[in-house]
Amino acid sequence: MQVKQIMQQKVAIADPNMTIRDVARKMRAGNIGCLPVGENDRLIGMVTDRDIAVRAVADGRAPGNTSVRDVMSEGVGYCFEDDDAEAAAQIMAKHQVRRLPVLNHDKRLVGVIALADLGRSEARSAQGALQGVSEPTDKERRHI
């Protein structure tokens, strides 16, 4: 099964110059925990509610003065719309993410695939992705 058959096609995008207050409100309105960050028609990162909490709130940064660019995650993993679901699951496991941007071959964002999408599909990849996503990192193991 190809990613394009099970991905979410309607994707809100955050501008890197938005404040984290504005992006948090956008996340709340959409009941979502992460947004792709785009600039000049290109995916440049992802911002999550955890990014906001750990990289801004925990450091006492002002939500009205801190930009998405200041807290977003860069070097984001992605898959292509014609990849099979297994490939997407492997990328999710490798990067330990529950949501993965989906690009076309022009490297334009066309959707997002979530672990839940894999779970609802007929693909058997969801279990492997869940195990990889849930595996504690070495840093997390030291704090357990």
Image: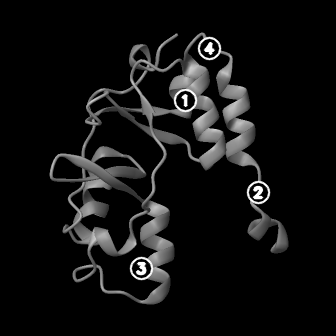
> In screen coordinates, is 115 left or right of 126?
left
Residue 38: x percent and y percent? 24, 52
- Front residue of this view, candidates 142 and 58: 142
Q: Which residue is mark 1?
A: 88
State which tag comes first along the sequence, 1 or 3: 3
Q: Which residue is mark 2?
A: 136
Q: Could you say whether the residue bearing mark 4 is in a helix, strand or loop?
A: loop
Q: Height in image: 22 above or below 62?
A: above
**Image point (67%, 45%), residue name:** 133
- Which numbered disc, 1 or 4, marks the residue closer to the eye? 1
User: Which residue type carries mark 3?
Assistant: Ala
Residue 120: x percent and y percent? 55, 18
User: Which residue type carries mark 4?
Assistant: Ala
- What whole-number distance in Å separates the C-alpha atoms at marks 2 and 1? 20 Å
- What whole-number distance in Å separates the C-alpha atoms at marks 1 and 4? 11 Å
Q: Which residue is mark 4?
A: 123
> In screen coordinates, is 140 left or right of 76?
right
State which tag comes first along the sequence, 2 or 1: 1
- What whole-number distance in Å separates the C-alpha atoms at marks 2 and 3? 23 Å
